[in-house]
Amino acid sequence: MSLELTAPAPEEPSVADDGTWLECIACGAQFAPFEDVRYTCDDCDGLLEVRYASPPTWDDFEGRGVWRYNAALPFEEGVSLPEGATPLHEVPRLEADVGVETLRVKHEGMNPTGSFKDRGMTVGVRVAKELGVGRLACASTGNTSAALAAYGARGGMETLVLLPAGKVAAGKIAQASLHDARILEVDGNFDSCLDIVQDLAARGEAYLLNSLNPFRLEGQKTIGLEILEEFHEDYGTYPDRIVLPVGNAGNTSALYKAFRELVQSGALDVDDVPKLTGVQAEGAAPMVEAIENGWDETRRWDDVETRATAIRIGNPVNAPKALPGIRETDGTAVAVSDEEITEAQRDLAAEGVGVEPASAASVAGLRKLRAEGVVDADERVVCLTTGHLLKDPDAAFEAGDDPEPVPNDTEAVLEHLAE
């Protein structure tokens, strides 16, 4: 199987362009990377991955941010704001409360538009320019639209975003609007929006930059590379487990691909690969359902609901890549309630780390797995938080403390504080 953790480095085919090509994970068909617009396999409609003749080692990386890792990417540089180099926070009180040896939080909300999606867009928009396309498009629960609009604007390209009406946080719509994207609100959920965008892309009306696009995930690989480098610099070892929220499962797929390539190059021992652990909201958990039942694929949930809008997705398109990633690394998946997500959001905020609800799912999931004994007390864990607090200010206000009205008088303020 092409997605095995111990699969050898691939041989370069004749269709490769400077050591890079596209390959179907289902049937193995290979394609030139930049001659035609292509999202899935011509032969079987399977998902594509970007493959490299020479997977990178740690010595190949220099600089800062996403493009520090250009040896693991299709180009030397992209359309950049710049992005990456996000903090790996220490959270000592939360670490002690959860009960693990080490807990760090990789805060992707510190990217230029406030989410991890910027890492994918710096690569994806660069590929769009290489292909000579005119209009960029995505379906979005919010963060993808904000990132695509910003990077499309930076690249001087027209941008179209489709959002589920009434289901996207205002802060995210505002970003896409200000960056001059054309915003279409669809009477349906995210999966309906993605169906339409895929149809538009198939008709040649737009270049799709959802995570179905294999080049998007190349940029997101750099999250995993940064985590490993930063953690190793601090502790001289790698984390035992990485816990991350799951919506379309792009990050799970991307991190697994990063680890496979490091194993192929000899830069990472198989025994040092972290366990990938996915977390979904109970109201949108098709990946968890598949893991718990031992299924090879997910089953689409048509009715999904959670306050964690960024992961309100019932048909994760990258499941065929992500399920092997979880299983091959001996990871797992867990569903958490909206109440558990809000509690984790407050816990992170108490450490000074402000995230949107979907981000906090990773901490909620870790807490649940630790309580169930799935995660051991001696584990070194990194939780990925994917979006900034201000992505969803309404949810932050609801989760936080209410303002306290006081009279316009210093003595009255002191009396109120004393009470």
Image: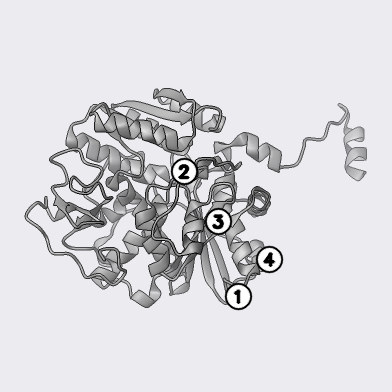
Disc number for residue 362: 3
Earlier residue among tags 3 and 1: 3
Q: Which residue is mark 2?
A: 115
| Mark 4 residue element | helix
Q: How far, Cα to Cα, is label 2 from label 3? A: 15 Å
Residue 292, percent from left and from top: 51, 63
Residue 58, percent from left and from top: 29, 66
Q: Which residue is mark 4?
A: 97
The amino acid on which the numbered mark 4 sits, given as a three-letter code, is Asp
The residue sitting at 70% across, 38% down in the picture is 398
Quadrant placement of the N terminus? bottom left
The amino acid on which the numbered mark 2 sits, given as a three-letter code, is Ser
Q: Which residue is mark 1?
A: 377
Q: Is there a contact, CB below 8 Å, between mark 4 and mark 2?
A: no
Earlier residue among tags 4 and 3: 4
Earlier residue among tags 2 and 3: 2
| Mark 1 residue element | loop
Residue 245 visible in image: yes
Mark 3 neighbour class, 10 Å CA radius: few under 14, some 14 to 19, many 20 or more? many
Residue 335, percent from left and from top: 57, 56
Q: How far, Cα to Cα, is label 4 from label 1? A: 11 Å
Q: Quadrant of residue 418?
A: top right
Locate residue 228 relative to residue 286 in the image: left or right: left
The amino acid on which the numbered mark 3 sits, given as a three-letter code, is Ser
Q: Nearer the viewer, mark 4 or mark 3?
A: 3
Disc number for residue 226: none
Q: Nearer the viewer, mark 2 or mark 1?
A: 1
The residue nearer to you, when weighing 32 against 156, is 32
The amino acid on which the numbered mark 1 sits, given as a three-letter code, is Ala
| Mark 3 residue element | helix
Locate residue 107 relative to residue 7 in the image: left or right: right
